[in-house]
Image: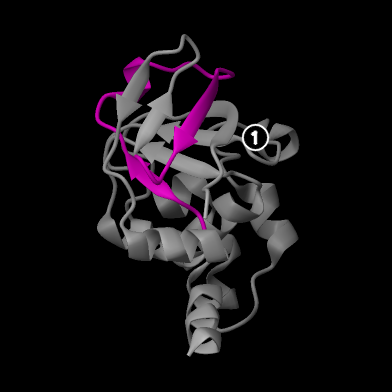
């Protein structure tokens, strides 16, 4: 199976972006544990504290690029909000491993790319190939990230962990 090459417009954020007060306002969703996600609410609050234009201007396929310690203090609603807003991939200099697992379980790939924030600007169009760990910058240069493992690719291709497991059981 040929993997899609993700291409999108960059939304750039800095270091130390907290999941529960930078990416979303946790106080607005904390009563929702155990309930289905309130998709319109999550989309409307995603990154609005850091960039008030984000919720209304983000487009399907856009890409988030962020610095060190991205999404610390995160919970499942953080990756859900990013995915529901239409972001196709998140490129970070560093983040918690729990964020990577929660995001991928929803079909949102996270790649660690050391120094990425020095090479992109808001609005740049870049390409991302998670299978090979390649990022093509607006000027044509490439950066490398750790490629996805076969298991991670299967989850991403399926659109999330639940669908990947369903596919596995159907193949048996």
For the image, the number of numbered tags is: 1
For the residue pair 172 and 140, the one nearer the viewer reads as: 172
Element marked by disc 1: helix
| Furthest residue toward top | 139
Q: Quadrant of residue 142 in the image?
A: top left
Say whether residue 155 is visible: yes
Check the image and report above or below for 18 versus 26.
above
Residue 26 appears in the picture as rendered: no
In front here: 118 or 8? Answer: 8
Is 110 within the magenta? Answer: yes
Near-viewer residue (112 or 29): 112
User: Mark 1 Cα within 10 Å, few/some/many (few <14, many 20+)?
Assistant: some
Position of 6 compared to 142: left or right?
right
Q: Residue at x 70, y 58 (%)?
A: 41
Q: Is residue 55 left or right of residue 170?
A: right
Residue 24: in magenta span: no
Q: Which residue is mark 1?
A: 54
How are the colours assigned in the image? one colour
Q: Is residue 125 above or below residue 58?
A: above
Residue 133 in the image, given as x and y percentages of width and height: 34, 39
Residue 122: x and y in percent read: 54, 19
Query: What residue is rendered at 44% in x and 38% in y?
Result: 129
Picture coordinates of residue 96, whole percent (x, y): 27, 54
Q: Residue at x 37, y 49 (%)?
A: 71
Left-right relation of 97 to 63: left
The part of the chain drawn in magenta is 107-132
């Amino acid at each position: 199976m040929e993997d899609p090459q993700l291409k999108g417009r960059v939304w750039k954020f800095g270091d130390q972006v907290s999941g529960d007060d930078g990416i979303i306002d946790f106080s607005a969703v904390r009563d929702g544990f155990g309930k289905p996600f309130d998709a319109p609410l999550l989309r409307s609050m995603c990154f609005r504290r850091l960039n008030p234009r984000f919720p209304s201007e983000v487009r399907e396929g856009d890409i988030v690029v962020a610095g060190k310690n991205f999404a610390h203090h995160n919970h499942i609603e953080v990756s859900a909000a990013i995915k529901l807003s239409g972001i196709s991939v998140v490129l970070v200099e560093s983040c918690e491993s729990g964020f990577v697992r929660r995001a991928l379980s929803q079909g949102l790939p996270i790649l660690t790319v050391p120094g990425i924030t020095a090479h992109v600007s808001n609005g740049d169009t870049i390409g991302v190939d998670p299978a090979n760990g390649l990022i093509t910058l607006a000027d044509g240069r490439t950066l490398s990230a750790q490629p996805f493992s076969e298991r991670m690719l299967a989850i991403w291709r399926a659109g999330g962990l639940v669908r990947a497991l369903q596919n596995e059981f159907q193949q048996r």
